[in-house]
Image (cartoon, helix red, strand yellow):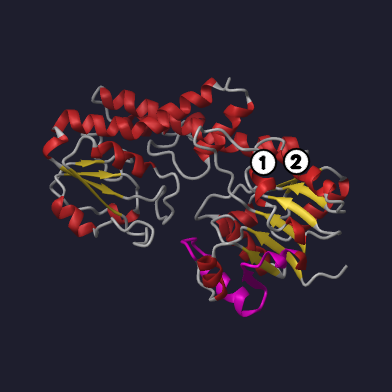
Amino acid sequence: MAFEHDVVVVGGGGHVGLPLAIALASRGKRTVVYDVAESAVSRIRMAQMPFIEPGADEVLAQVVADGMLTASTNPAVVATAENVIVVIGTPVDEHLNPDPNAIPRALATCAPYFRDGQLLALRSTIYPGVTALVRDMVDGMGLRMDVAFCPERIAEHKAMTELFELPQIVSGYTPEAIARAGDLFRSLTDAIVELTPEEAELAKLFTNTWRYIKFAAVNQFYMMANSKGVDFERVRAGLTQDYPRAQDMPGPGFAAGPCLFKDTMQLAAFSDNTFQLGHSAMLVNEGLPLYIASQLDAAHDLSDKTVGILGMAFKAGSDDIRSSLSYKLQRVLRFKAREVIATDPHVPAGVDGSLLPLEAVLERADILIIATPHHEYRELATDKPVADVWNLLGNGVLI
């Protein structure tokens, strides 16, 4: 069967799907993005990135101009591609439980357009066993489709390099599915790692949870040292200097974003909530904003102070506020301070209309908190107290 496109990326207007679509198009794959977000689709058609992703703007402009990348809100485009890559968010519910049926439900919109001969490759982080659920769904439709799970492992803002440099895990229930998935992703990287779907599902969750636990350990160390008046960054610099077994120790800071906490929760649920280490990591990382607020309140009595938060995105240089702990810090401070104001150089006003210019925050605030280590704050000039858990300014102990 002849297909109009080589690839359709379902959910391809987001932070994971769009860089992948751009990368595949740049390697000669006729690619179409399917996304329900009309604003994102419109911007892609105009060769404009809907969000910040270094190195993507120029490539997007080229592949759109060359006719290698298009975008649509019409699910019927799914029928036009030989390879269907699914990139759909898998949030936990209000009780912090993962929903194994979220992906099958989300696929209901485009499932009527699945065709015999297609490869269906799941790329979202998924709860273990979801690949099997999707395979059963496809079988129940009477379709001859190969089903694969090929998890993404890129870091936001590094997609346009890591998509080409990192090994790609591929998995499937048949040798044909694994071979087809390998051939597809070999257009990006020669390093292909074959696992079973169950192994690949756990590999993705283990990867993110491992990072989350490392951040929690360091954040716990930071709070221990800071509570005793010790500069943790001097300790870290000293113990890591020319000592190979400590080189992977990160600095302290907010461990946030759309993946790490959520994936740790999914792994905890998978273990029937016996994952004590994961639960402890959540308590530490999610508790850091409260620790900062409490330390500041004890030192300054925030009840008559205006607190300015610098940075609301979940990571430096980003415009992405998903699961940002800056907002948790903001909520905590509103119970303690007279007023809480915030700024961010990258988050658009359309995303958070309450943000103020940096100059206004610097003028009005009595105390400042660097919540996101944007490079714009490295040369911060102020005579006001600054709480800097990231040690961006080299201030040492949290005030």
Q: What stretch is highlighted in magenta?
A: 50-78
- Residue 340 in view (yes/no): yes
Q: What element carries label 1?
A: loop
In the rendering, at what x and y percent does residue 201 appear? 69, 38
Circles 1 and 2, Cβ within 8 Å, touching? The answer is: yes
* Residue 178 visible in the snapshot: no
Residue 52 part of the magenta-drawn span: yes
Residue at the location (34% across, 54% down)? 375
- Quarter of the image that includes the C terminus: top left
Quadrant in the picture for residue 30: bottom right
Marks 1 and 2, the one that precedes in the sequence: 1
Q: Residue 351's quadrant in the figure?
A: bottom left
Q: Quadrant of residue 70?
A: bottom right
* Amino acid type, label 2: Leu
**Left or right for 380, reference 103:** left
Query: Dot 1 corresponds to which residue?
Result: 101
Of 85 and 394, the residue lying toward us: 85
| Mark 2, residue position | 133
